[in-house]
Image (cartoon, grey):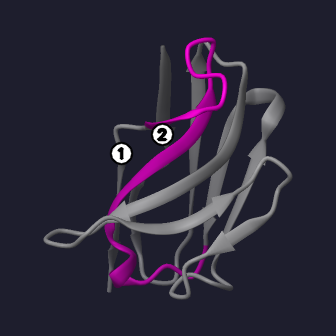
Amino acid sequence: QVQLVESGGGSVQAGGALRLSCVASGSIIGINAMRWYRQAPGGQRELVAGITSDTYTTYAESVKGRFSIARDSAKNTVHLQMNSLKPEDTAVYYCNADVRTPWSPIGREFWGQGTQVSVSA
């Protein structure tokens, strides 16, 4: 039905930057909110940032002022610009989206496969 594919992960030193991208494809009527989550080794998955269809954004306190989420609705894409990265940002980052499909016209949740971000001190 719908696939979310992330890209842009990698390894950087503390203070560096990365830009994650997520593209949704498949039987898409529209997309409501799009979000980025992350899960560190041994930790729980946590919300990093979210953006609604009318571009209202929210951020975890730990990333405010350093991360920025943006979307290109025409391309079904969401980006996460991550600046001033810290070792504690190391995690697998997952794209999440509420997608309206012919079978779920109100929307249902889809997840990407995740992309690794590693920040060294």
Contact? badges 2 and 1 (CB < 8 Å): yes
Residue 76's tag is none
Q: Is residue 91 left or right of residue 28?
A: left
Q: Is residue 100 left or right of residue 108?
A: right
x 63%, y 12%: residue: 102
x 59%, y 40%: residue: 98
In the depicted view, which residue is nearer to us: 102 or 28?
A: 102
Badge 2 or badge 1: first in the primary sequence? 2
Q: Report x, y in % for residue 53.
A: 79, 47
The residue that label 2 is drawn on is: 6
Please state the total of marks drawn on the protein image: 2
In the depicted view, which residue is nearer to us: 53 or 36?
A: 53
Segment tinted magenta in the rendering:
83-110
Amino acid type indicated by mark 1 = Gly
- Spatial CA distance of label 2 from label 1 is 6 Å
The residue that label 1 is drawn on is: 114
Q: Report x, y in % for residue 82.
A: 58, 69
